[in-house]
Image (cartoon, helix red, strand yellow):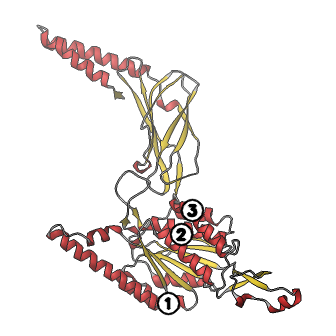
Amino acid sequence: MILTGRTGLIALICALPIALSPWPSTAFVVLLAVLTLAIVVDVGLAASPSRLQYTRWHNSSVRLGERVNLGLLVHNGGRRRFRGKIRDAWAPSTRADPPTHRVDIAADRAQRIDTCLRPVRRGDQQSASVTARSIGPLGLAGRQKSRRVAGQVRVLPPFLSRKHLPARLAKLREIDGLLPTLHRGQGTEFDSLREYVVGDDVRSIDWRATARRCDVVVRTWRPERDRRVVIVLDTGRTAAGRVGVDPTAADPGGWPRLDWSMDAALLLAALASRAGDNVDFLAYDRITQAGVFGAGRTEVLARLVEAMASLQPALIESDANAMVSAILRRTRRRALVVLLTDLNASALDEGLLPVLPTLSARHRVLVAAVADPRVDELANGRADAAAVYDAAAAEYSRNDRRAIASRLRRGGVEVIDAPPTEIAPALADAYLAMKAAGRL
């Protein structure tokens, strides 16, 4: 049984006649008895929430930051009209709106209610429970019952870096020879013959074809296709740090490094698949958290999004030795291995650096890291003594990152260290530069 605000208001009004009555105790007992009787009658006349039946329309997925309406069909199987409220409860991170729904359902009738979700966290979001509150005809009291109604929404990464894809595809067409500018580099392959025009490299002249046609003919080249790109996502403790600003929510807290790395990985995967290369994906800390191997070029992006949806950073140190072993076990042919991690000196010194030569000896390795823009802001602070100490600490951190990046480059590893909003286009540009030079 539940009481409404109207009951409290009536009880407050009843205090006036009790105060003015010459027999206050008698007036109190009489009014209390009347109010209690009215409440009992109202509860008895209220429809039973237990007779409600729920059917949920399932929505399989939604991108982070987008809205989705979840439908719930409520059928009144009782013999009385159901008047009251229904709350379809979800986790707070789903930002469910409205929190409650007013309903008026006749006997043996149904009504649909829609709850709008705007999730601010990735992963599988589960519904909590459905609570029905039936109010009697007097509006004084009613009945309430909660029931678990299964519901799930998978919140996918938003892929905000998609806006950079058209410009990179234009560069790819230029590199691939679909535009007049053609590139020749180590690893490029023969494409076709055409007549010589002023400005062509004389080293591209095909003398045999020129002799056959009695005209100067040059060879055109295009980057080799069917290369393999292995994207490795470090889901260890360094991926949990929040950097930048969350572009999908109103709160000032930034995204975890893991989410920015995912966004960069999706742009690279979309670009590489359009370039005719094969893309594999591995998420690892101490064990394999997710993996996509052998996916077709048309389906690799969708499979990556699904694999990334439920990933969360683990507050443990990643096992670099096991990670490298997993990469080598999965990838036999020479490939471009893109490791999305953080340039944390202590973590890399003890983890990745000792085993990196084993990986770089068989594959081309590129390490991409998300830098914290707040560190650059702190490094410029000189307002007071505390700001100077913060600036010194920030500068020390930046020097550590530069030093570890230099050590990686000396070991033959390419390094990208960029702010959150720039990491995705910077990684795509690095891939295109390798593609143009034939270094994949």
Q: Secondary structure at mark 3?
A: helix
* Residue at the far top in the pictured view: 22
Residue 96 to residue 143: above or below: below
Q: Which residue is mark 3?
A: 305
Please state which of residues 330 and 63 is positioned toward the viewer in this rendering: 63
* Residue at the far front in the pictured view: 198
Q: Is residue 109 left or right of residue 341?
A: right
Q: Which of the two marks, 1 or 3, is nearer to us in this view? A: 1
Say whether disc 2 or disc 3 marks the residue closer to the N-terminus: 2
Indicate the amino acid at tag 3: Val
Q: Which residue is mark 2?
A: 265
- For image coordinates 61% across by 71% down, the residue present is 171
Q: Which residue is mark 1?
A: 412
Residue 93 to residue 428: above or below: above
> Residue 364's quadrant in the figure?
bottom right
- For image coordinates 76% across by 88% down, the residue present is 205
Say whether disc 1 or disc 3 marks the residue closer to the N-terminus: 3
Quarter that holds the C terminus: bottom right
Q: Secondary structure at mark 2?
A: helix
Q: Position of residue 393 (x, y in %)?
A: 24, 76
Q: Would you call the spot at circle 1 few (<14 residues within 10 Å), some (14-19), or many (20 or more)?
A: some
Separation of residues labelled 2 and 1 (CA atoms): 22 Å
Indicate the amino acid at tag 2: Ala
Residue 283 shows in the view: no
Q: Position of residue 78 (x, y in %)?
A: 54, 25
Separation of residues labelled 2 and 3 (CA atoms): 10 Å
Separation of residues labelled 1 and 3 (CA atoms): 31 Å
> Residue 111's quadrant in the figure?
top right
Q: Are marks 2 and 1 in contact (CB under 8 Å)?
A: no
Indicate the amino acid at tag 1: Gly
Please state which of residues 228 and 390 is positioned toward the viewer in this rendering: 390
